[in-house]
């Protein structure tokens, strides 16, 4: 199952050159870029772990792409995304976010049913990845 979160998630994987162009666009808009990673891509898990600090006042995508490559080298079996934050007053929000790395296999999610008071049934989703401890959730395909 392919996780579809963020911009471009329904497209094929972006090349480093395409990633660089998107970062250049974000920087041309004055947005600050950051790199984040996780091994639990649950849709409600909006706070991924930051790789370094947000990069303010950059004018070239090379600095952000260098951090993406370093994160890929350290966390090859994690989801990695680039965020572009607009700090202009009245916006102050993420304007662009896209995945730049995925694990070799993406196990997906299962539907979980809970019986509640009366005959009420509630549904939620749970990631198959969380059946294993953090750091062991994705293994390289042999």
Image (cartoon, rainbow, N blue to C red):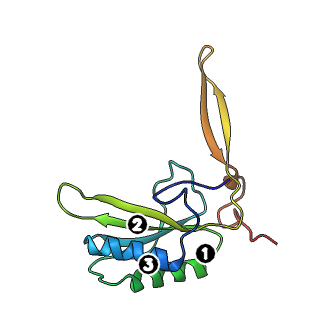
Residue at the right extreme?
142
Q: Whole-percent x and y of residue 10?
A: 55, 56
Q: Residue 123: which disc?
A: none
At 71% across and 62% down in the image, what residue appears? 105
Q: Nearer the viewer, mark 1 or mark 3?
A: 3
Vertical placement of 15 versus 132: above or below?
A: below
Vertical placement of 107 versus 115: above or below?
A: below
Residue matched to label 1: 75
Residue matched to label 2: 83
Label 1: how many Cα within 10 Å (few below 14, some 14–19, many 20+): some
Front-lying residue, 12 or 125: 12
Q: Quadrant of residue 115?
A: top right
Q: Secondary structure at mark 1?
A: loop
Q: Is residue 75 left or right of residue 34?
A: right
Please tell me how many numbered marks the rendered image carries: 3
At 60% across and 75% down in the image, what residue appears? 75
Residue matched to label 3: 20
Q: CA distance from mark 2 to mark 1?
A: 17 Å
Q: Whole-percent x and y of residue 133?
A: 69, 60
Q: CA distance from mark 3 to mark 2?
A: 13 Å
First of labels 3, 2 by sequence position: 3
Q: Nearer the viewer, mark 3 or mark 2?
A: 3
Q: Quadrant of residue 11?
A: bottom right
Q: CA distance from mark 1 to mark 3?
A: 20 Å
Q: Secondary structure at mark 2?
A: strand
Vertical placement of 19 versus 96: above or below?
A: below
Residue at the left extreme?
89
Front-lying residue, 105 or 49: 105
First of labels 1, 3 by sequence position: 3
């Amino acid at each position: 199952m392919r996780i579809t979160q963020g911009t471009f998630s329904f497209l094929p994987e972006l090349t480093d050159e395409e990633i660089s162009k998107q970062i250049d666009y974000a920087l041309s808009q004055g947005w600050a870029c950051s790199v984040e990673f996780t091994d639990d891509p649950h849709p409600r898990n909006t706070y991924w772990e930051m790789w370094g600090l947000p990069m303010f006042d950059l004018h070239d995508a090379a600095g952000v792409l260098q951090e993406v490559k370093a994160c890929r080298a350290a966390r090859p079996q994690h989801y990695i995304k680039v965020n572009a934050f607009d700090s202009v007053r009245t916006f102050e929000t993420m304007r662009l976010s896209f995945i730049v790395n995925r694990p070799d296999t993406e196990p997906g999610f299962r539907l979980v049913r809970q019986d509640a008071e009366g005959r009420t049934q509630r549904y939620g989703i749970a990631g198959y990845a969380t059946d294993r401890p953090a750091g062991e959730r994705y293994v390289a395909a042999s």
